[in-house]
Image (cartoon, helix red, strand yellow):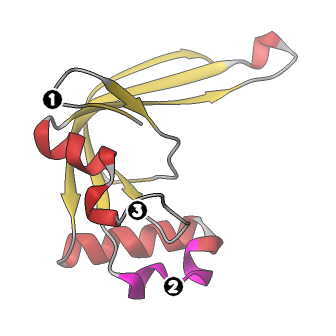
Amino acid sequence: MASVDEAGIPLTVPICFVYKGEFIYSPIDAKPKTKEIKKLKRLRNIENNPRVSFIVDKYSDDWTELYYIIVQGTAEVLIEGEEYNNSIKALCGKYEQYSKMGLMQLGLPVIKITPNKIISWGN
């Protein structure tokens, strides 16, 4: 996911995500971080500028199988409530690792992305 700070400097981080309904959800998980959760650059960037983008792609040595999807949208950070709980359940349903780490009990933020534009190419 790419976000931009107040000086216009981009930050790109790999994310795990789930697409549910019209929205995309990506958690801040329990993997080790270099900073405390509230100080993560991606969260501060979203607070200052909610516009984000991310890409999903498939590479293959057979170039007829290549594809990508670019999502541009606005992000917000969820920390509680029904939508937050449902997003965590959906993420745990997609990624067994999140269930094993107890993501539901950790109370960590979830990034909610509302797609504004989707660009795709390939299969």
- Left or right, 115 with respect to 123, comes to left
> Marks 1 and 2, how far apart in space?
34 Å
Mark 3 residue type: Ile
**Dot 2 alpha-carbon crowd within 10 angstroms: few under 14, some 14 to 19, many 20 or more:** few
> Marks 3 and 1, how far apart in space?
21 Å
Q: Disc 3 or disc 1, which is closer to the eye?
A: 1
Q: Disc 1 or disc 2, which is closer to the eye?
A: 1
Task: Residue under label 1, please give it.
Answer: 6
Residue 58 placement (x, y as % from top left): 69, 28
State which tag comes first along the sequence, 1 or 2.
1
Total numbered badges shown on the rendered structure: 3
Residue 106 higher or lower than 74, as above or below: below
**Dot 3 alpha-carbon crowd within 10 angstroms: few under 14, some 14 to 19, many 20 or more:** many
Mark 1 residue type: Glu
Task: Residue under label 2, please give it.
Answer: 102
**Dot 1 alpha-carbon crowd within 10 angstroms: few under 14, some 14 to 19, many 20 or more:** few
Residue 30 placement (x, y as % from top left): 50, 72
